[in-house]
Amino acid sequence: MAAEGEDAATAAARAFKDRLVEYDRNAAQRTTVIDDQNDYFEIDSNAWLSDQERAEMRQRKKMEDEAEAAKKGRLTVTIDLVGRRVIQPSADAVDGEFWP
């Protein structure tokens, strides 16, 4: 590439330019982001889990979802307008528990 009549400064500049061009060519390879946190939340696509760990994580996720759905169950309250109180019947409450 270098011509015979090229001085040292021109050769150094050409080498620097070639290095920058090569740097620019493979910039996409150097700037790849590996999102390990996303892998934590994605059970099926997590490359770090074994098949047994995936099955355990699916089971745990299913149990958590069922517990969340049970927690969001219906709430029935009775509002006593005359006595100005709210009565919430529940299985673990003593009969007629009141909220002032």
Image (tube, grey):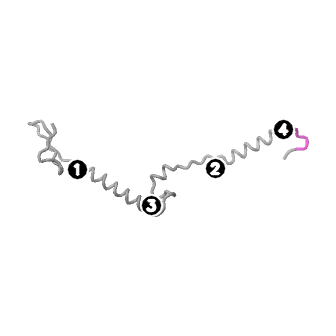
Q: Is residue 18 left or right of residue 94?
A: right
Q: Pointer 1: what residue?
A: 74
* The disc label shown at residue 14, or none: none
| Residue 6 part of the magenta-drawn span | yes
Q: Pointer 4: what residue?
A: 10
Q: Earlier in the sequence, mark 1 or mark 4?
A: 4
Amino acid under disc 4: Thr
The reply to whether the C-beta atoms of the residues labelled 4 and 2 are less than 8 Å apart is: no
Badge 2 marks a residue whose secondary structure is: helix
Amino acid under disc 2: Gln
Q: Residue 77 lies in what quarter of the image? A: top left
Q: Residue 60 lies in what quarter of the image? A: bottom left
Q: What crowding class fits label 4: few (fewer than 14 Cα within 10 Å), some (14-19), or many (20 or more)? A: few
Q: Earlier in the sequence, mark 4 or mark 2?
A: 4
Q: What crowding class fits label 2: few (fewer than 14 Cα within 10 Å), some (14-19), or many (20 or more)? A: few
**Cα separation between marks 4 and 2:** 30 Å
Check the image and report above or below for 89 versus 81.
below
Check the image and report above or below for 57 versus 11.
below
* The disc label shown at residue 53, or none: 3
**Cα separation between marks 2 and 3:** 31 Å
Q: Is residue 80 left or right of residue 21?
A: left
**Cα separation between marks 1 and 2:** 53 Å
Q: Pointer 2: what residue?
A: 29
Q: Earlier in the sequence, mark 4 or mark 3?
A: 4
**Cα separation between marks 4 and 3:** 60 Å
Give the position of the C terminus as an image quadrant.
top left
